[in-house]
Amino acid sequence: MAGVGGRELADGVTVAQQILVLLVLVRIQVGQFESESVKRSSGSDGMTSTDHRYNTGGLTGAEAPAAVILAAGKGTRMRSPLPKVVHPVGGRPMVCAVVDACREAGCERIILVVGYEQERVREGVASQGPRWAEGIEFAEQAEQMGTGHAVRCAEALLTPGDHRRALPRDVFVLAGDGPLIRGQTLRTLLERHRATGAAATLATALLDDPTGYGRIIRGADGRLERIVEHKECTPEQLSVREVNPSYYCFQREALFRNLARVERNPQSGEYYVTDVPTMLLREGARVEVIDAVPAEDVLSINTPEQLAEVDAIYRARRPQGAVAGGGAR
């Protein structure tokens, strides 16, 4: 007979897992209280005197990159009814940290692709105050059909038919559940992308245990050949430690031109943005890869325990008083 901590309820969820979910929900409420407290002490807009999120490094208009942040997933392994990106890191929805990093890298336009329980994501953004939420747009992915499909859902906001704002030359594509992302990493990615005139640039990471991540397969000349998803790797490819943590920078026109031609994966039935770099290589475009992501930054968040680990790392990095209110990065 299993011990108390491992006893299963009727739906297969253990008592321990239920307790962990309850703790996550309590932390969300506490985080919202902390955020409101910071707003009261720094002003109604939630910004602090040390906030540098709007320093775009002098990039404006078409020169300022845009960002498409994928935030539509459910995160079923979290054993929680909340969308994955709303779970708290540093007292705020984890997607807020990704937005902060994009702003540090010079992004003026940030588009969150939302789907499952999207109102929770919108509310999480709005709860940070009107000034923090300024410039954030939303695109809806009504049906989750893969990362490529998710990015295409944002296309209407980044095409010539939208005259509300200048169209960016380059677009970051990032995951909303990676709150340890650093603005400096994105700046490095953008600098390589523009210095080389690449159509696409990927930032990769070297992991001791790359299980679950897509592998970066390089040719004899050291340049990218393709990205292979973990479940599709050969035994030889599984030994590759360089992985794709989903840090992309694309030329906007090249991204959407090729996304329109991405085919459904025969195994999953989904459309993958990882197909685009390979398609660009086939048409003779330049694709750069830079090993720029610290291993710690790509820690997975698939369980409440992993959420707690990432939260501790995030809080340790923040200056005192910066957590939950935005603060300096």
Image: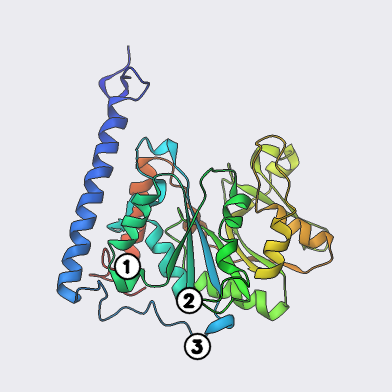
From the image, which quarter does the C terminus lie in? bottom left
Q: Position of residue 242 (x, y in %)?
A: 64, 54
Circles 2 and 1: CB atoms closer than 8 Å = no
Q: How is the image coloured?
A: rainbow
Of badges 2 and 1, nearer the viewer stands 2
The CA span between labels 1 and 3 is 25 Å
Circles 1 and 3: CB atoms closer than 8 Å = no
Residue 318 bears which disc, if any? 1
Give the residue type that dot 2 points to: Glu
Q: Residue at x 33, y 71 (%)?
A: 132
Residue behind mark 2: 108
Give the residue type that dot 3 points to: Gly
Task: Count up the numbered dots.
Answer: 3
Q: Is residue 114 above or below residue 329?
A: above
Give the residue type that dot 1 points to: Arg
Q: Quadrant of residue 100?
A: bottom left
